[in-house]
Image (cartoon, rainbow, N blue to C red):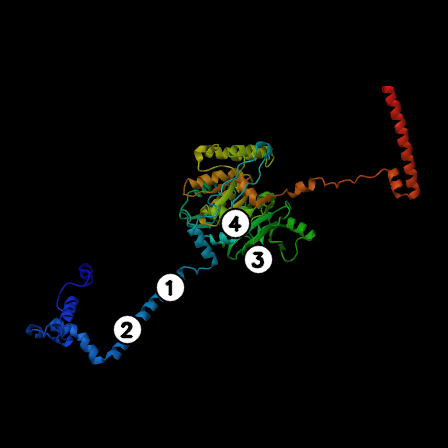
Amino acid sequence: MTGGGSLSVALRTPSYGSLQQLHNNIVINSNIGLAKSPFLSKRPSSKMLIPNPRDKEKGLPIFCCRLLGRARISMLLLFLLAFVIFTLGSLLVTKEQERSAILPPLDQSSLIQIAMNLSDHPCKYFAFPPPPPPENRRPGPRPCPVCYISPEQAIASMPAFPSESSVLRQLTYAYDENPQRNEPHAGSDFGGYPTLKQRSDSYDIKESMTVHCGFVNGSKPGNQTGFDIDDADLLELEQPRDIIVASAIFGNYDLIQQPENISEIAKKNVHFYMFIDETTEAYLKNSSVLDDTKRVGLWRIIVVRNVPYNDPRRNGKIPKLLLHRIFPNIRYSIWIDGKLKLVVDPYQILERFLWRENANFAISRHYKRFSMFDEAIANKAAGKYDNSSIDAQIDFYINEGLTPYSEAKLPITSDVPEGCVLIKEHTPITNLFTCLWFNEVDRFTSRDQLSFSTVRDKIMAKVNWNINMFLDCERRNFVIQAYHKDLLDHMPTPVAPRTRELPPALTVLRNSGKRGSLRHRRERRRSRRHRKVSAGSNDNNSI
């Protein structure tokens, strides 16, 4: 042996039947043979012959194995193993079935959503570019860059479940076949003339509420309620939809603008609805724009009859603010005024302004005005409504506590919206907001900007709810504004550029033959000689 240290590591300590003792005995008696080894020839002592109960227990499995045989024991073990595997597999299948009953299967969009959740949002580090130098800045409002993700990624980020409605869980609507007007500024038959007490009670947010919200005197919205819709169209509007885009043109006030840059998946799954009155319908049919298919491009045309107001702008507020009553089974809606053209995919808009911001209502703020008092002054200066009605509405709000906007209202960024675009998730609290907003429009002027902040602030004082008021330049990124039809009709028709006519003499020379051309050359030579002589005489005089 060469190294005692390595040997002590490799061998165990001495004991009966140990490897070290066996090795030593074999080495010492190698000349005698293995049969004469003391280890092999040693007999157990008499104490070892006494039976031990523990030894019996240890020997019982060995006895069974000898009795049954190795083949039968192997078969028994295999049977037990198969039984265990079958039991575990059944439990796993049951758990998977229970899980699949709760969770939807993972499709491609779900995988994209998981990937987006694991990584940073593509627009996380997006920032506005620096403004151009003052000499290159364009005056007035203009669009600004907006970071959108692809429509496929936007679909993947769509929430699987509706947003939670703060406090309010169930919202129902007032019904009255014979509404009576008992107070000034009480509204209309269509709105049901809610009293001031009913108006005040509607801001006391509870878990279950009933409020006035238009369509008060019919079995369902659009059926003998004013703002009537054909039965076939009503059936279309009652279908469950995830997303709709809606607009309206009343009084033939605008031209239909076709959406652009809409993805194929949005064309298939997002529904576009355009509400028109009979006046607009007649114009479209006479212009051969509307036929029996009730479609104009992407827009599905819905004709409204028996409109409740004489003012087309006020009629337009019904689908704008009461879409949840006309479409009772939708999740999200994008409203754009009839003068606007949509130029960004609806999925991208919803992801950017609702889902990414964890909001359920979004509207842009005015690019320049922040106070409701400034907005009232601007409306009167532009002749948007009669001044006395605007003054009466603002005075009513002042008596309720309306104050000019200030930084003390932060994080609220403005009191004045640019209300031509509404992005909304249809939940009880957002439906209540648009109901009460419509009631103000019905009670006072049709200028919905004047009543927006009053309704918003009253609801926010009761519940934890907010509105995403994004920049107006971001709104101008996804819609393009056109002129109203009445302005286009009064605009002068563009004059075609006038072509310059040649003098008659040159025309004759250009159309004459060789003879005329020769005469023209001779005259030019004579004029040149005449100019030379004249020039020489002038030079001589000058010298």
- Answer with mark 1 or mark 2, whichever residue precedes in sequence: 2
175 vs 392: above or below: below
Residue 289 percent coordinates (x, y): 67, 53
Badge 1 crowding class, 10 Å Cα cut-off, few under 14, some 14 to 19, many 20 or more, is few
Q: Which residue is mark 4?
A: 348
The three-letter amino acid code for the residue at tag 4 is Gln
Q: Which residue is mark 2?
A: 80
N-terminal-most mark, 2 or 4: 2
Front tag of 3 and 2: 2
Q: Which element type, helix, strand or loop, lies under badge 3? A: helix
Q: Nearer the viewer, mark 1 or mark 2?
A: 2
**Nearest to viewer (mark 3 / mark 1):** 1
Which sits in the foreground, 388 or 139? 139
Q: Which is nearer the eye, 516 or 252?
A: 516
Q: Nearer the viewer, residue 126 or 289?
A: 126
* Location of residue 526 in the rendering, given as x and y in whole percent from the top left corner: 91, 32
User: As shown in the figure, which amino acid type bears the numbered disc 2?
Assistant: Leu
Residue type at tag 3: Asp
Specify which label sits upstream in the sequence, 3 or 2: 2
